[in-house]
Image: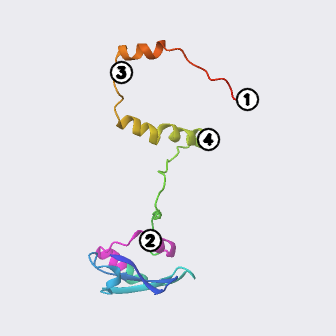
Amino acid sequence: MIRFQRIGRTNDPAFRIAVLEKERAAKTGNIVELLGTYNPRSKALTLDEESTKEWIAKGAQPTDSIKNLLINKGVLSGKKVNVLPKKTPQVKEAPAEAAAPAEAAAAPAAEAPTEAEVAAEAEPAPEVTPAEEAPAAEAPATEEPPAA
């Protein structure tokens, strides 16, 4: 597996790009080969591109972040992967729906059940017999006079 190995001080991260066995943790230091370094603050990247291509050809799987970095550098070709967690599912819009984004945004909200609806479905409604309904329907409604 090709992945980042964090080095650097607290609040000043820097990363090694290392090849290591998948079962091994990144912090153990048991790396197979060091491919380069990356500083996210200065965007400084040193990378041995030939060794990286060789390891990928041998079957080493890069992590999503490494894959995006290699695509930016031009070592790999392909589509980037979204590595950030999704808070809400993204709905892919068709070209016909692009003309009406307000309708497309309202449709997913109407389809998703609210928490109250989910809770109501989870609890069965109490069964009411017709005898219990009659006295409640016949009772006159009392109105309180407004306070002055």
Part of the protein shown in magenta: 53-74
Give the image location of residue 33, x and y in percent. Answer: 33, 86
The mark closer to the camera, 3 or 2, is: 3
Give the image location of residue 100, x and y in percent. Answer: 61, 39
Query: How many angstroms separate mark 3 from mark 4 (CA)?
Result: 42 Å
Residue neighbourhood size for the residue with mark 3, other residues' Cα within 10 Å, grouped as few (<14), some (14–19), many (≥20)? few
Residue type at mark 1: give it: Ala
Query: How many angstroms separate mark 3 from mark 2 (CA)?
Result: 58 Å
Q: How is the image coloured?
A: rainbow
SS at badge 4: helix
Q: Which mark is residue 102?
A: 4
The mark closer to the camera, 4 or 1, is: 1
Considering the image in quadrants, where does the N terminus appear? Answer: bottom left
Residue type at mark 4: give it: Ala
Q: Which residue is mark 3?
A: 128
Whether pointer 2 and pointer 4 mark residues with C-beta atoms closer than 8 Å, the reply is no
Q: Is residue 141 left or right of residue 81?
A: right
Q: Earlier in the sequence, mark 4 or mark 1?
A: 4
Q: Which residue is mark 2?
A: 65
| Residue at 42%, 13% in the rendered image | 134
Query: How many angstroms separate mark 2 from mark 4 (CA)?
Result: 33 Å
Near-viewer residue (115 or 69): 115
* Residue 123 within the magenta-colored segment of the rendering: no
